[in-house]
Image: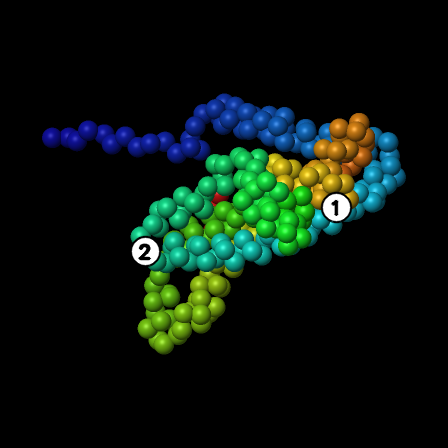
Amino acid sequence: MSGAPVRTRPHPNEDPLWIRIAVLAVVILFIGVMILAPMATVFVEGLSKGLGTAWEAIREHDAVAALQLTLLIAAISVPFNAVFGVCASWAVAKHDFPGKSLLVSLIDLPFSVSPVVAGLIYVLVFGLQGWFGPWLLAHNISIIFAAPGIVLATLFVTFPFVARELIPLMEAQGTDEEEAAVSMGASGLMTFLRVTAPNIRWGLAYGVLLCNARAMGEFGAVSVVSGHIRGRTDTMPLHVEILYNEYDFVGAFAVAGLLCLMALATLALKTLLEIARPELDGHGV
């Protein structure tokens, strides 16, 4: 008895040419309309009155202060999140313990909570009318409407990035190499430094880049806790909003263009990492 012919699923490359062209056209059109066109508009508007005017807007005192604060916040929050991400991913990927799924859910929490809500939470806790407000005021400690509050808000919205990049990477690597190192007498710290760290260094660098990009561009949570004090608590996104509300469109788009250039530099580094380590594709968020 002859068997029924086996039907195989066609490979995506075997789709009709018109389908491939249509899908590619939709993707290119969406990227062009939603990403490239708005970004090009930022640079066109920022340079509409010449490079000198845009440069003066970037060199202005409040803009420089906003740039310095943005870089400072990123320089503080990113290392903290890198350490947390490594510890959290090590615990989740290498160990089984009660509440493991809850920990993973808590790591993902900032992805689902509005940044504005996160900022309001810190105001409730550390504001003048908050839980610790009177104590902080009595000891002359400023958190809300000061740099520490901005750091806390930025930490909240950025801390999942490194962890979510490393957890699937560590889970894919398993525990065989660590167990072999321990069986040969290596301590826990030595095992991490000699075995685990080399295996995750590219993933860690990738996660740090994503975390840094979000830290520099965060608006919602920072807007709530900063107080919008020009020259003191305004980051670059907040300074762009102020200039735009004051109808200084060239200045707003010039500063926004600088922020876009910083984002593009981060994207370039990310692309270089993907080229250097193709296996990074598909990991993380």
Q: Residue 6, image x and y in percent?
A: 24, 32
Q: What residue sits right under mark 2 in the picture?
A: 96
Sequence-first disc among 2 and 1: 2
| Three-letter residue code for mark 1 | Arg
Disc 2 secondary structure class: loop
Q: Residue 280, image x and y in percent?
A: 49, 50
Classed neighbour count for the residue bearing mark 2: other residues with Cα under 10 Å, few (<14), some (14–19), many (≥20): few
Residue sitting nearer the eye, 102 or 89: 102
Disc 1 secondary structure class: loop
Screen quadrant of the N terminus = top left
Kindly tell me whether residue 218 is visible in this rendering. no
Q: What residue sits right under mark 1 in the picture?
A: 232
Q: Residue 165, image x and y in percent?
A: 48, 49
Query: Disc 2 vs disc 1: Cβ atoms closer than 8 Å?
Result: no
| Three-letter residue code for mark 2 | Asp
Q: Residue at x 48, y 68 (%)?
A: 193
Can you tell which quarter of the image residue 40 is in?
A: top right
Q: Is residue 103 above or below residue 224?
A: below
Question: Marks 2 and 1, how far apart in space?
Answer: 45 Å
In the picture, measured across the screen, residue 285 lies left or right of residue 126, that is: left
Q: Of tags 2 and 1, which is closer to the observer?
A: 1
Q: Residue at x 23, y 30 (%)?
A: 5
Q: Is residue 175 above or below residue 33?
A: below
Residue sitting nearer the eye, 191 or 62: 62
Number of dots carrying numbers: 2
